[in-house]
Image: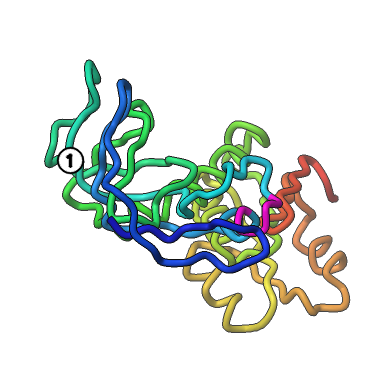
Amino acid sequence: MRIFSVSSHERPPTLTTAPDCTPAKGEILVRNLACGLNFADLLMMRGKYQDTPALPFTLGMEVAGVVETLGPDTDGPAPGTRVAVFGGSGGLADLGTYPADRTVPLPDAVDDITAAALQIAYGTSHVALDHKARLQPGETLVVLGAAGGVGLTAVELGHLMGATVVAIARGAEKLEIARAAGADHLIDAEDPDIRGRLKALGGADVVYDAVGGDLFRAAFR
């Protein structure tokens, strides 16, 4: 099978071949059809991510594909089932083995590319806004870096959770993307008086820095 392998943190990854992998007990074998790539993958390439696998390893933290086989004594989706998996690595390969309990069967309405790309970005924003900040309907959410992957998911989820969403991003084009995702108010990151603009809107109950990952509740009035 083909793999996109990282064999050194000082050199770029290379496309090479390796024997087909075989699932162990508790694992499934998936034919990878789509793979989401994230900033964490770039950090892994340089050995700077907190969960960087031992060398050599294959990039690709989140995938969508079709179950090929199950490991011995393993319960999981039947062969032929379309699934999404957060595997942590291994997605940029024709095949991958993953823990069966990380597998989510996909409905027909969700295509492979969408399924591969939504897990980390939406999961990150959902944990931040729902589990951590406990964002409530009617509250005001400010999203910094609102046009990036995590930023846009925060805008979308904040809107769906009933919050008033203030999107901060650089430039009119990015701000329009945030508006389309559900932002109620737009502020250019180059505005010299962002604080004043926020005060005029009544402040914020939650501020989420989607780039740096910082989250503040009741941060600004």
- Which residue position is annotated with label 1? 68
Q: Which residues are magenta?
A: 44-48
In which quadrant is the N terminus drawn?
Answer: bottom left
Left or right of 61, for residue 196: right
Where's residue 154, x and y in %? 57, 53
Q: Main secondary structure of the magenta part?
A: loop
Q: Secondary structure at mark 1?
A: strand
| Residue visible at 67% across and 82% down in the picture | 171
- Is 128 one of the magenta-colored residues? no
Percent x, y of residue 23: 28, 32
Q: Tell me the residue at 46%/52% (across/down).
A: 58
Q: Residue at x 47, y 66 (%)?
A: 14
Residue found at the very far top of the displayed protein: 73
Which residue is found at the position 62% from the left and 83% from the top? 172
- As drawn, which residue projects farthest toward the bottom? 172
Magenta span has 47? yes
Q: Is residue 136 left or right of residue 209?
A: left
Residue 209 image position (x, y, % from top left): 72, 54
Viewer-proximal residue among 151 and 156: 151
For this rendering, which residue is in front, 206 or 86?
86
Kind of residue at badge 1: Glu
Q: In this orientation, which residue lies closer to the viewer: 101 or 144? A: 101
Q: Position of residue 131 (x, y in %)?
A: 60, 31
> Crowding at label 1, few (<14), some or many (≥20) Cα neighbours within 10 Å?
many
Q: Is 112 left, or right, of 141 in this rendering?
A: left
- Say whether residue 102 is left or right of residue 29: right
Rendered position, 109 above or below 168: above
